[in-house]
Image (spheres, rainbow, N blue to C red):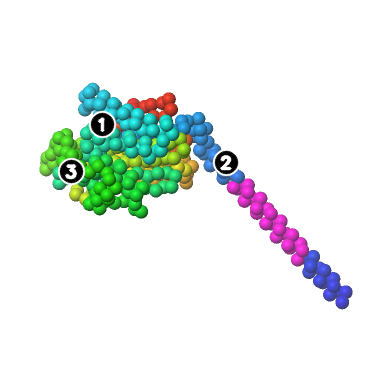
Amino acid sequence: MVSTIQNNVFIFKSMESRTMTITKVRQLTLLCLCLLLYACQSDVKSSKGSTIEKDTQGSDYAIVIHGGAGTILKENMTEEREQDYIAKLNEALDAGEAILKEGGDAADAVVAAIHLMEDSPLFNAGKGAVFSNEGKNELDASIMRGYDQNAGAVGGITNVKHPISAARAVLEHSDHVLLTGEGAELFAKDVGLDIVDPSYFYTEGRWNSLQRILEEEKVKKKEIAELSENKHGTVGCVALDKAGNIVAGTSTGGMTNKRYGRFGDVPIIGAGTYADNATCGVSCTGHGEYFIRYAVAYDVSARMKYLGEGLQEAADHVVNTTLVEKKGSGGLIAIDEYGNVAMPFNSAGMYRGYAKSGERVVKIYEN
Ligand code: ASP
């Protein structure tokens, strides 16, 4: 009997000590987990640290635009033409900045800036769109907002004066993200957008470019990207408004001599355009097929999110390492949540500029 009691006490004690051991192990595990979590957080902070310090002193709004990247060389440009580009880029920045300064919506700023460039024959978007190999203008555009990551895009439209507005209408007035061809045109008409005759998009300069490329092609069968004059002037804009929302938009005629029905990166969300308030907004320009294959716009955001890279580092890597290694030419513009701006390109030039409070830069060539 006594021995049974002693045995039970022993069993009870050993159970108690095992329970205590388990509790201690649990407590220790919890402590380790907390320490690990803390370490990870300070790691993320320190890897982004310099950017954050610099960033928080930044502007409460910012806008960045591009008018296309490509073989843009000073020696091929007249002084007058250069001034025309600079003036139009400034005008587009003025239009967007005026809205942001007043506390307006980033989407309104993006659309206002892009409208100005779509109306100008200088750029390969809207009025200055390039011709397909069938001698037609087929326009693509997209827009994405960073707070809810909703997006709208149109592809291959021929009669909507402002393709960026059609993209915005898809975002705001449909359940879809991408509408193409006649369906997109009917939708644009239904929502009351400006419809024009396709001949509105004819410009002599773009027509002559197509003829020159067709001649070049006869002499030497080259890849579309290698042919001269085929990829200048897509337009894009990214804005951060005072409410902290980032919106990115892009509009293009595509690439001269493209096949009927070809879409580039512009109407593909994640390729030519992307926005996430937690990371950045991006608008791309260049040889679209590469931007689609390497999900370029999304990749900038993903590098920031998963690798903890700052905006400049992420954008530079994608343009000057990923794309260069794959021989994809072009560039992009981007803004992060702090109003930092990046504008990397791997071609000879890129029409580009940005504005923040008290700061304005407009450039064409490398420096
Ligand atoms: N990315 C555009 C496209 O491939 C062209 C450009 O940006 O110039 O359609």
Quarter placement of the N terminus: bottom right
Q: What amino acid type should be assigned to the residue bearing mark 2? A: Ser
CA–CA distance in space, label 2 to label 1 = 44 Å
Q: What amino acid type should be assigned to the residue bearing mark 1? A: Ile
CA–CA distance in space, label 2 to label 3 = 56 Å
Label pair 2/3, CB-CB below 8 angstroms: no
| Beta carbon at label 2 within 8 Å of ligand 1 | no
* Circle 1 crowding by C-alpha within 10 Å: few under 14, some 14–19, many from 20: some
Q: Which mark is residue 72?
A: 1
Q: Is residue 248 magenta?
A: no
Q: What amino acid type should be assigned to the residue bearing mark 3? A: Pro
Q: Is residue 28 magenta?
A: yes
> Comparing marks 1 and 3, which lies closer to the viewer?
3
What span is in magenta? 15-37
Mark toward the start of the polypeptide (2 vs 3): 2
Q: How many marks?
A: 3
> Measured from the top left, where is residue 112 in percent x and y?
33, 36
Tag 2 residue: 42
Q: Is residue 287 visible?
A: no
